[in-house]
Image (cartoon, coloured by chain):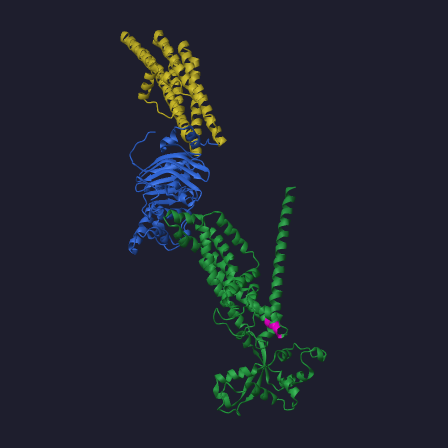
Amino acid sequence: MSSNNFKKRHRAEKRFKAYGLISLVTAAIMLIVIIGSMIYKSIPAFTNYTLDLEVNMVSQSLDTDIEEINYRGIVRDSFFSLFPEVQDRSEKRKLSKLISSSAGYSLRDFIIENPTYGNKKFYFSVLFTDDSDLFYKGYVDVYLPEDERRLDNQEIFWLTKLQSRGRVESKISRNLFLNGDSREPEVAGFYGATIGSLITIFVTLVLSFPIGVITAIYLENFAIKNRITDFIEVNINNLAAVPSIIFGLLGLAVFINFFGMPRSVPLVGGLVLSLMTLPTIIITTRSSLQSVPPSIREAALAMGASEMQVVFQHLLPAALPGIFTGAIIGLARAFGESAPLLLIGMVAFIVDIPASINDPATALPVQIYLWADSPERAFVAKTSAATLILIGLLIVINLVAVILRKRYEVKW
Amino acid sequence: MTEEHIVTSFDDELRELTDGLIHLGGLAQIALANVEKSLKMNDHDLAKKTIEADKQINALQFELEEMTFNILAKRQPMANDLRSVFSSVKIILFLERIGDMCKGVCKRIAKGDLLNAKSPKTIDALVGLTKDVQNNLDLVLDDYAQGKADNALNVWRSDIKIDSSYASILTAILEDIRNKPEAIEALVPLFFIARYLERIGDQATNIAEVNHFIVTGEVLTDDRKLEAEEKTVF
Amino acid sequence: MNDQLNNKSLIQCSNVNVFYADQQALFDINLDIRENEVTSLIGPSGCGKSTFLRCINRMNDVIDICKVEGSISIDNQNIYDPEVDVVELRSRIGMVFQKPNPFPKSVYDNVAYGPKLHGRILHQEDLDRKVQESLERAGLWSEVKDRLHEPGTSLSGGQQQRLCIARAIAIDPSVILMDEPCSALDPIATAKIEELIDELKSKYTITIVTHSMQQAARVSQRTAFFHLGKLIEVGDTEKIFRSPEHEQTEAYVTGRYG
């Protein structure tokens, strides 16, 4: 009888372990699939096909201000010279659409930086448009009927011809890492959004960490327990569960409409995210303070330490790892948040890289949202690339949390 | 103390010890009763039997001593338990001494010293002394068995009487010796018997004092005895 | 009670009543604690002996719902007087707890904490000397002199407790309160602490709460028995363990309390 019972118990245990293993494997597979597909989809975003174009600036008069030269025209003329057979105006327009409209700007930037090239003939690397780029990357199915493709037969013929001349090469896309947003996928990058995110999160950190920690210490160690503090406590716990978009609405109503702060700026974004992060920081700080053994508090009090000395000399240092972890988890959540930022206008199309808390900016998650919404096919890869970067940054943040916890960990 | 210990095996051990002590007391009482009978009847067989029975007393003594030793080691008794366990050691010793002294008297009887002495008056006095001593021993052992110390003072008072009877027996023996110096050798054994009986009386008083200590926690000093004596006068 | 007044009383408690919210924890405690003696407080769990101990350095102040009435005088000063500074009071009273609770700092910093906290020692050499002296007095110096900068929590349980004692005596208290200091220790460590208590009593007045009657009997000169918040009996330790006056005391010390 009893041995039977034991067998049954052992079987149940084995079964449970098997379930656990199965769920773990399932979760791991899902994670691998998601990350894997993200990496796979993002591959095209990291490279760009460029054309080595011979630019002729010899004819340029040295007297002209280098800022006022018609760089676009020069690029276009240089490009047309590769196809002398194309003479028709409409065909020429079609041909010019193969290379990125940004080519003129990058030539201008190059000349401004290197004025000595101002009247020379030299090779200059020019970006293709997203569609041509995708063709080279093999994403255009040439067997589809012509009207179902983004490129018609003529364009494909030109692109193939260019490639056969050995003028086309694939390069790491610097724009992706160093540019702000753009309507042209080949130019758009997530640098602006990343900086926007970092500034926003910095504002969040600076506001929510001290306020949250001090609030928690006060509530935990100094506040008299009565109905008012109970009420505050319940509300803090409730706030942690409020959907983030509500904080966005609140920010819109209070900071922008009432206080008249500018829209789309990291300052307001940080304020809103602080509101969202505060309850998390307060709750985790309180629970880490509570988890410090009461014997330490007693020891310090009995030694004649004042309540404040107890908190700052004993409780806080011992609770620090927990507080850091909580704060960083809260910040990580804020870092990945898009909904409240949408409402305060950080969803705007912003090309410039923000430099201060008062510059219009967007944030990485919002950038992802924007790109995912864009019709151009090339943005699919960009979306994935930006998502990878977001995940990467979150991993870094969590790693910092782990390191801080290990470093300040107290052994009892 | 009627209340039980939380650890019931401790109670069992204490009870076993007390029961053993009462048994030992019983053996001493029997020995003393035998002394009285042998004295009266000059019963050599009974005397020899009593000498033999002393081995039993000694065996029980060792057994009980071991028991107290174990209780002290295992239970670390406190307060009244400490007093009773500690006092057990003393009572065991007193009872064993009583047994020894009964044996001593019986040895004299078995040797035929009583007839040799040719002094029936002194022997009658010795029997009377034995009865008094017996009475005292009965009282203290009853007290012990009931966990009281009611008779302590009575015993002490009665011991004063025993001491004076002893003194008069001695005077009588000395008188005899003075009258018949040649019988000195035959009379000296009576002297020893008297001395033994008086010592047994002392042991009974000792037990009474220990008993008093167990029950009240106070040592019965001579001052206290006198104090109590004065009180009881009125 | 056969009081032999060889030592004058340092702490006088009169009519001490303690309430936790509506519940009364101590009832009219009148107890004198004598200078340079070890007084042990015994009694079943929840009898109020720890509560009473914590009244002496006002550790009960920390508990919001706890209210103390009556007066406790140390050196003829009522410590419940509104003018008394609790922090200053605690700097004169050392306390050792049930579980060794060294700070998660080095051995040195643990001992130096009190003197530094109260700003009594300003020079590094003086502090070093104080730390050594306290550790020596706690019988720990020879064991830790080479590991002063290791965390206090890395010591063994008994060493930790002696470290806590060193920490307590580093502030030169006149009174040391011990709340079951050996209940978490093995017999050897317990013996060392008891030996230490015996040595310390020449310099300090010690009050110890203990659950071990043998320990109370071994280390203390006077013993107070608490039961259900009342002080049942106080007297010379020998008297309490040999022949207590009160029946409840007797029932408790003999193990008949049920």
Residue A73 placement (x, y as % from top left): 57, 87
Residue A304 placement (x, y as % from top left): 36, 48
Q: Is residue B131 above or below residue B55?
A: above
Residue A329 in view of the camera: no
- Report the span colored magenta: A378-383
Classify residue A349 as left or right of residue C232. Answer: right
Q: Is residue C49 above or below residue A384?
A: above
Q: Is residue A322 above or below residue A174?
A: above
Q: Nearer the viewer, residue A18 or A313?
A: A313
Q: Nearer the viewer, residue B51 or A74?
A: A74
Considering every residue shown, the one lying at the far right of the view is A145
Rendered shade, chain A: green
Q: Is residue B47 covered in magenta?
A: no
Rendered shade, chain B: yellow
**Quadrant of the rendered image containing residue B28:** top left
Classify residue B21 as left or right of residue A334. Answer: left
Q: Nearer the viewer, residue C210 or A335?
A: A335
Q: Residue at x 59, y 68 (%)?
A: A369
How many marks overall?
0
Rendered shade, chain C: blue
Q: Is residue B13 above or below residue C57?
A: above
Residue B33 in view of the camera: yes
Residue B128 placement (x, y as % from top left): 37, 10
Residue A64 placement (x, y as % from top left): 50, 89
Instruction: Look at the image and tell me in which quarter the N terminus of chain A lies.
Output: top right
Provide the major secondary structure of the magenta segment.
Answer: helix
